[in-house]
Image: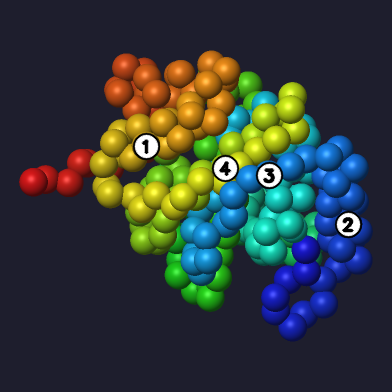
């Protein structure tokens, strides 16, 4: 996936994208729906259960003509990986700064003409189904919508939903997202847990305070 600026991307990044996209096509993945024609949004992918998820992500953004970005630890952007990480769409953040990474990413979004920030809200493949709230804090701070996408590694199918604008009520918006995912993946127990999280029946991972619901 070539970058839209005038600088030529590194050979390694071009080879990497080519390999990932070809693997996606070889495996026969099919996706329904389209990415909305909006300049900036957070692109959620769930459930995150396989190492193939990165291949799927690469294939989908290529087919949808989306130039993706992702959040990475600043240590990954050190030489000799600096140029490669930026060419792949990386945004370096210092996660040791409490809450600082949200403002760092929000500022990067503000300064960009277009931004499709891809996030796996579960955080890891070993998740119990609960989502971390970082994606929501970023969407609120940047004033951009959240676009959900689901995957099924067994059937090699997936789909993209309509954008959801964050209202400031984390649990209410999480309930909308849970309903979308449960509609398309009723077989996935992780989304049952997500629905329970939206109802406040299980805690949200992480220590960052959740947004307060808007009054009135």
Query: Pointer 1: residues within 10 angstroms few (<14), some, or many (20+)?
Result: few
Sequence-first tag of 2 and 3: 2
Q: CA distance from mark 1 to mark 3?
A: 21 Å
Task: Please tell me in which quadrant of the rendered image residue 106 appears.
Answer: bottom left
Secondary structure at badge 4 equals: strand
Sequence-first tag of 1 and 2: 2
Percent across and percent down for residue 109 are 49, 65
Instruction: Locate residue 200 relative to residue 162 in the image: left or right.
Output: left
Percent across and percent down for residue 177 are 42, 37
Which of labels 1 and 3 is toward the front?
Answer: 3
Q: CA distance from mark 2 to mark 3?
A: 19 Å
Q: In the image shown, does 63 or 214 lie closer to the viewer?
A: 63
Say the numbered circle drawn on residue 31. 3
Secondary structure at badge 3 equals: strand
In the picture shown, does residue 58 fall above or below 84?
above
Instruction: Locate residue 75 relative to residue 147 in the image: left or right.
Output: right
Q: CA distance from mark 2 to mark 4?
A: 22 Å
Q: Give the residue pinned by disc 4.
A: 149
Image quarter where the N terminus lies is bottom right
Say the numbered circle drawn on residue 176. 1
Secondary structure at badge 1 equals: helix
């Amino acid at each position: 996936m070539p970058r839209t600026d005038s600088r030529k991307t590194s050979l390694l990044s071009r080879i990497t994208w080519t390999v990932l996209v070809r693997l996606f096509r070889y495996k026969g993945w099919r996706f329904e729906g389209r990415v909305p024609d909006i300049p900036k949004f957070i692109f959620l992918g769930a459930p995150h259960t396989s190492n193939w998820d990165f291949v799927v992500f690469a294939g989908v953004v290529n087919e949808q003509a989306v130039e993706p970005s992702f959040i990475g630890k600043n240590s990954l952007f050190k030489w000799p990986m600096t140029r490669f990480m930026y060419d792949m769409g990386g945004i370096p953040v210092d996660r040791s700064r409490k809450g600082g990474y949200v403002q760092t990413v929000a500022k990067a979004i503000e300064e960009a003409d277009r931004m499709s920030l891809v996030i796996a809200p579960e955080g890891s493949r070993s998740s119990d189904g609960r989502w971390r709230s970082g994606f929501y804090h970023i969407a609120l701070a940047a004033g951009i919508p959240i676009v959900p996408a689901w995957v099924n590694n067994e059937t090699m199918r997936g789909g993209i939903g309509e954008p959801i604008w964050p209202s400031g009520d984390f649990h209410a918006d999480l309930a909308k997202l849970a309903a979308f995912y449960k509609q398309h993946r009723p077989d996935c127990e992780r989304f049952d847990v997500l629905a329970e999280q939206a109802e406040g029946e299980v805690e949200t991972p992480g220590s960052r305070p959740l947004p307060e619901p808007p009054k009135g």
